[in-house]
Amino acid sequence: MSAQTHYLAVFTSDKTGPKWRAWRAMSEAEQAETARIGVAAVAAWEEAHRNSIVFRGGPLGPTKRIGDDGAVTDMVNLLTVFMVVRADSHEAAARLFENHPHMNPFPCDGVEVMPVLG
């Protein structure tokens, strides 16, 4: 039995930041070509890391928040894509995402990695 732990990885992206401004400044054709290249790069990354991926996850959509008062509101957060990986350490899990294509060519700006407890 492996001593590896599962980690939740959440890609972040400031939808008002410079990477998204640059994305929105592209023409539709430039966005489509960048997306084509990016999708292929993500597929290659997933293939190269297939033994570490527990759950591929996926992109996250618009967010609703319910407060302790029961009010439901729309909100914008930094959460963009998620997945679950396994690794020997927290550091190793984070390092899996170095140079991930969601950060280039896509406009994510980081990946938050945390152990799944329990």
Image (spheres, helix red, strand yellow):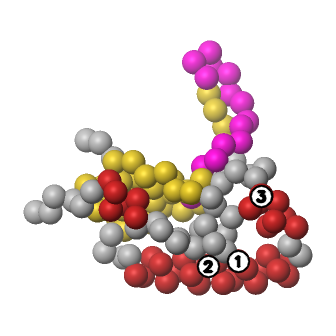
Mark 2 lies on a secondary structure that is helix
Q: Position of residue 28 (x, y in %)?
A: 86, 76
Tell which circle, 3 or 2, labels the residue nearer the N-terminal end. Answer: 3
Q: Is residue 26 left or right of residue 33?
A: right
Q: Is residue 3 left or right of residue 103?
A: left
Amino acid beneath label 3: Pro
* Range covered by the magenta-colored residues: 67-81
* Image quadrant containing the N terminus: bottom left
Which one is nearer the viewer's eye here, 50 or 13? 13
User: What residue does disc 1 label?
Assistant: 35
Evaluate whether residue 55 shows in this view.
no
Q: CA distance from mark 3 to mark 2?
A: 21 Å
Q: Position of residue 84 (x, y in %)?
A: 40, 58
Q: Nearer the viewer, mark 1 or mark 3?
A: 3
Which one is nearer the viewer's eye here, 100 or 74? 100
Amino acid beneath label 1: Ala
Q: Are dots 1 and 2 in contact, CB under 8 Å?
A: yes
User: What residue does disc 3 label?
Assistant: 18
Amino acid beneath label 2: Val
User: What residue does disc 2 label?
Assistant: 39
Q: CA distance from mark 1 to mark 2?
A: 6 Å
Q: Is residue 17 above or below residue 105?
A: above
